[in-house]
Image (spheres, rainbow, N blue to C red):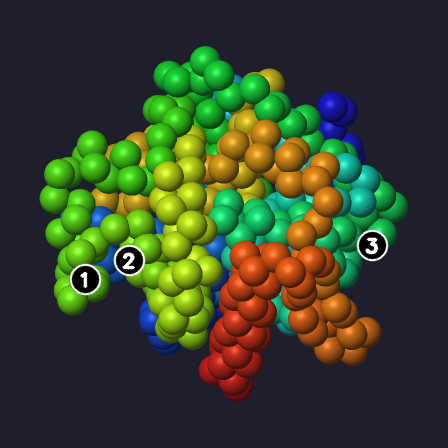
Amino acid sequence: MQVNNFIAMQSVLPRGSTYLQTDSCVSGWHRCTRLQLPTPLRLVAVSQLYVNVPRGIRSAAMSDSQLCYFDGKKDFILGRPSDAAAAVLRELQPSMVLFSHDGLDGGSGVALDANHVVTDMHVGLIGRHLQVLTPSGRKLDGYLERLDVIRDLAIVKVRGLAESGIEPAKIVEDDRNLSGKSDFSIGSPVTESPSKAFDCVSEGKTQEVTSLYDFLDNQSRGWAGWLKFLVPSRTPGHFEAYTSFMSKGFGPAAAGFVEQNPEKFDKVAQQWFSLPRIRSSGFVSNGQSGGALATDSGVTRILQFGLDDYPAASFSMPAKDVVTLANSPSRFSFRYDRLHGLQKVEAVDPRDPSAVAEAQLANIIAEQGEEDIVRVKRNQK
């Protein structure tokens, strides 16, 4: 993959802007800096609506001493990362995009081909008008084409992406023999500094392939305690865990819908809690959700979330699941209006009760995202 000579660009957002955190943490992944769950678990939201975050210059001409990387403590800084991190960051920058809606940034994405980008579902549903900022500085319209509700993945078709000079990332489907190897988390983190670059890198090591259930169970036999704290009237299990995460991640409406339809979501919850995810020691920050977790061979995973109170606990979805989603017939159709954007997600087969229920959940999440955007814009005034 050859690195393009990007057009060096100043901030695409207003100069002198400041970071604005939403005043509500009742919903999480794309609306709240951090989800505070009972000790010892704290889920870090890895995608967030944030307002007018200044961007630094993004150019292939930048020296290694001007790259953005995690300092190993608590912040992303401009400087000189390791040679390996700098090489992977430069290799992937032509393939990375930033998602936004009405000026509110909401997550990262990776180009799959000349027309499509992959990201997380919770990023793809941040609002009804999805915009994609490319490496060359172009802002394009994005349209959902496929969703995987269980794996929290979305394939977005982007009009004009090929003309923007995007370079599809090299996707590595084979995730065997990765344990202990260096990996690199790449995306656009939330930052208050006007000097940060568009994409940043955090270096870590792949720890294991594990499910959330197995990880929490192995870390602390008391993992059921925090579930019991969240849902004190029930015996903890995969369904309670799923509704709790839905509440923290997408708000009470989404969680309420799931909880009221256990016959439709019990299997979904079970799959979600037992899915094999790849755990890394790399730091994952807000805004990097949907970005790339890569090795020097290419993109092996899509970033999703981290568990902040555990060391070495950021989780990503294997790239092979992305390829499967991209090459499978869509279970959903997406109705768009030219002026008002996404109007409705519908099941392609109305006789499939699981697809119908998941489409309803996607609509609730999109509606909540739109309401959050209105609230944040109102707070700007």
Mark 1 and 2 residues: CB-CB less than 8 Å, in contact?
yes
Q: How packed is label 2: few (under 14 Cα within 10 Å), some, or many (20 or more)? A: some
Q: Residue at x 31, y 50 (%)?
A: 238
Question: Could you say which quadrant of the image residue 280 lies in?
Answer: top left
Q: Is residue 301 visible?
A: yes
Judged by depth in the image, the label closer to the viewer, 3 or 2, is: 2
Task: Give the camera-side residue of 32 and 350.
Answer: 350
Judged by depth in the image, the label closer to the viewer, 3 or 1, is: 1
Task: Give the camera-side residue of 74 and 142.
Answer: 142
Q: Residue at x 42, y 50 (%)?
A: 267
Farthest top residue?
177
User: x%, y% of residue 357?
Assistant: 54, 63
47 horizontally vs 325: left or right: left
Residue 234 bears which disc, if any?
1
Task: List the residue tagged with mark 2.
Answer: 240
Question: Which amino acid type is shown beneath numbered disc 2?
Answer: Glu
Question: Which amino acid type is shown beneath numbered disc 3?
Answer: Arg
Question: At numbered mark 2, what does the secondary structure look like: helix, strand or loop?
Answer: helix
Question: At numbered mark 1, what does the secondary structure look like: helix, strand or loop?
Answer: loop
Question: At numbered mark 3, what does the secondary structure look like: helix, strand or loop?
Answer: loop
Q: Is residue 12 visible?
A: no
Task: Give the camera-side residue of 303 and 271.
Answer: 271
User: x%, y% of residue 4?
Assistant: 77, 33
Question: Could you say which quadrant of the image residue 249 lies in?
Answer: bottom left
User: x%, y% of residue 216?
Assistant: 24, 39
Task: List the residue tagged with mark 3.
Answer: 159
Whichever of labels 1 and 2 marks the residue nearer the N terminus, that label is 1
